[in-house]
Amino acid sequence: MALSGTLSGSAIREKFLRFFADKHGHRIVPSASLVPTNPTVLLTPAGMLPFVPIFMGIEQAPNPPRNVSCQKCARVSGKASDLANVGVTPRHHTFFEMLGNFSFGDYFKREAITWAWEFITEDLKLPKERLWLTVYHEDAEARQIWQDVTGFPASRIIGRGKKDNFWGPPGPTGPCGPCSEIFFDRGGEPAGSPENDEALLDTDRFVEIWNLVFMELFQDDAGKTTPLAHKNVDTGMGLERIAMVIQGKDNTFETDLLYPVIDHVTKMSGIHYKKSYETDVALKIVADHSRCLAMALSDGIVPSNEGRGYIIRMILRRAVRYGRKYLGFSKPFLYQLIAIIRNHYQEAYPELKVRYNHIVETIQREEERFFETLERGSKRLDEILEGLRASKQTCISGEEAFKLYDTFGFPLELTLDIALEEGFTVDEDAFEVAMQAQKVQARGARGKAAEAIVKDGVYGEIFERVGGTVFRGYDTLSEESKIVALLVDGQLVDEVSGVNQPFEAILESTPFYAESGGQVGDRGSFSREEGPHGVTVVVNDTVKVGELFVHKCLFDNGDKLRVGETLLAQVDPVSRHQSAIHHTAVHLLQGALRQVLGDSIVQAGSKVSPEAGRFDFTSPKGLTRDELNRVEFLMNHWIQQNMERSIRLMAIEDAKTSGALLMAGEKYADEVRVISYGGVSSELCGGTHANSLGEIALIKIVSEGAIASGIRRIELVAGEKAYKQFKMVEADLREVSDILKSPLSDVATKVTKLLDELKQREKLIQRLEEKSALAEIKTIQAAWSADKPIFIQQMDGLSPDTLKSFAEKLARAVGPHVIVLAGNFDEKAVIVVSVSPEWIAKGFQAGQLVKTIAQACGGGGGGKPAFALAGGKDPSQIPMALDTVKKEFAVLA
């Protein structure tokens, strides 16, 4: 039941702030944004977060050094996330308000405890007999102060361990200390008393309403704590919890802070509160999530696929799913709740009123998009679960969970919710691996420059203001369109001028294709005839950032270009045509590869431009010359048949079922374009293509090779580029024909004959070298003696094989030895070392010697202790290297 003198949530908030400001000299600090300045968190999770720099000593304390605030908080991500508990427990929320008073080296335990007791018993009039207190079990000082202030016996002040009653530090090091909590006994079950059973404090019967943290210690990086010279106080009281207690409600959702939203949802849906457990959970989730959305969007957060934007989009979609499944909503409804939230909270948070229209429009737009995809996504998830049941498995794979996210816009948390309801789990680790892989690929696709601007958030601001760019380029290469944004060096500007001035332009609509799906962006020009001199702009590239098409421009000449003006955007028809035929050629290449090598071929990437096309695919080995010829023949055979292009818009699952192939690097929407040419190629693709295969005219494979383990790459050219490739090869052959004085038809035979003759001459030269070496060995052998067992010699002009053979034969011809040979052959150093067992025993090893000499000659190598061979890039260093070795053996020589 409600306590006497029931207060509204707004009244409690105001009473708390005024108590500490008017009675105890605190400065009222407005709530900080949900977007924190602290880079370690995505959303503000606690009332003290804005003051961490002061607690850490990084910022100077205010004057007076005591603050009071009501802070907007959100706990939706990370280890502290309360998302899964919303609607299930009586008092968990994604968004909540935290009342707190703070002392920065000013007052400490006695004042904090005294004022807390004064506020809850005198101002809020909570009955003392229903209050319980906890302290850190080693904090005798706090226990004694509580007894002095309250008159409670020691048995009503429960000592608890570090897990429950010790806070901090906020990082690896920093301020920390014991805390003291105030609990309210709501009555009912379970029966008993905390003085006999401490665990009762963790049940729903008891609710923690206020936590007082006493920062009196500093913890270093070794975990050692020492007393702080200036001690701080940080307190936190959840507004929803204290309102629940004062208003005598069973849970925080029934307080006046949230129940008006629930009541409105029941009127919209016709589902009454407390009809069933499932519908009650859904009503609470919808109310909680809509409030969180309103607060987040009022602070400038934009729904997206990354960071805090992803979190906001995720809770919106979670609320929509619960509303659709349990409350019967079949069209957008969340946006209709924002007026209730605004009216109830705008006095405390005026930004809700200022940004009301933006909040409503953003939520409605997001809902419309999600409703369009939710049915197909739910159907796909049902199919996955049915398959798992049939195979008696209980875990949704990370790959499937990622496909639900990437294809249907199902956040992982949504899949987790549904899986839990149906008794399944999800491989979250595998999902994260797939997510990270996609992020790496996405960063590569949009380029470093675009990525840097995205991080600055400027594109998000533009999209929020004007929405996405409308693409007209499938139907036209020329269009008049309005400029909606101009950027210079990543900064928004109102106008651009100056010869050769680089800038970026975003239009309301555009015929320019933006880089995606492996196809590079269009090039062309902007122009405007109005003004004294008109305007001409060169467009060098077009990239896609989210739903915006960003034109990379260079101001050519003329008057200024201004935001809001209309200009003529013209795509370069030649480069567009060349990109289109190369894109189509890559499609044909995949079809031909699958026919020649089989359907096991899987695309691993692609890139097409006006200059060429390339296709990466999985294969354990390279293609033979015959296989490459067959692939090239098939593509040109299909071109001769001049098959017409077919474009169909289909649901993505229907497209996959039809056998259409996915294009690597493409981000697929729920409705996709399927590009087909007869029965030889069918792919999901958003790029530009030839109207018929005859437009390509000709395809020539330029190269095939490995780019990674198990990944091959084929590069090709098409159309005029292919013709030029053939003519270039022909010109090279004719040059060879002229040198050989042989007809083109006989060039291969003539070259083969010459190579055979060259090999025979090389063998003859090697035999002559060996004969000469044998004669020299006999001379050396005759002069050899045990007193001179070391032979170090430079021998230029001998091939590595000949020098190696010479060293081996010399080693057999003499007794114990150290033989070091080095020479210049074909402008490279060749080194050979042989060491007999007797000298190995004395500590000399061939591998070590050859490495020393080779390094001096700019190379490397090694070998066994008895024999070693190496090479070097700089034969000019051979004399110096050999002299070094001779000096080492000077005593023995």
Image (cartoon, grey):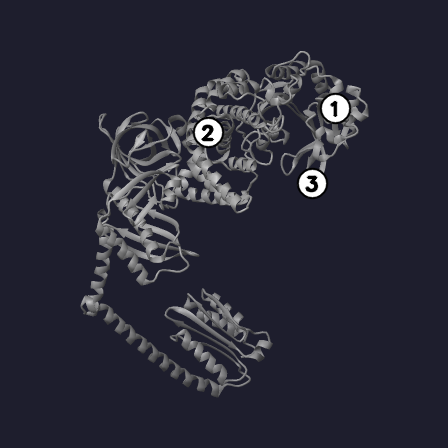
Query: What residue is shown with label 3?
Result: 223
Q: Is residue 779 left or right of residue 762?
A: right
Q: Earlier in the sequence, mark 1 or mark 3?
A: 1
Residue type for callout 2: Val
In the structure shown, which secondary structural element does the residue marked by tag 2 occupy? loop
Which residue is drawn at the image coordinates 80% and 26% (left, top)? 155
Q: Nearer the viewer, residue 293 or 335?
A: 335
Q: Residue furthest bottom?
A: 782
Instruction: Name the outermost residue toward the top.
Output: 5
Going by the numbered disc 1, the residue's amino acid type is: Trp
Q: Position of residue 93 (x, y in %)?
A: 58, 27
Say left or right for 570 vs 14. Answer: left
Tell which tag, 3 or 2, sits nearer the viewer: 2
Q: Is residue 697 visible?
A: no
Q: Secondary structure at mark 1?
A: strand
- Residue that label 1 marks: 132
Is disc 3 placed on a helix, strand or loop? loop
Q: Earlier in the sequence, mark 3 or mark 2?
A: 3
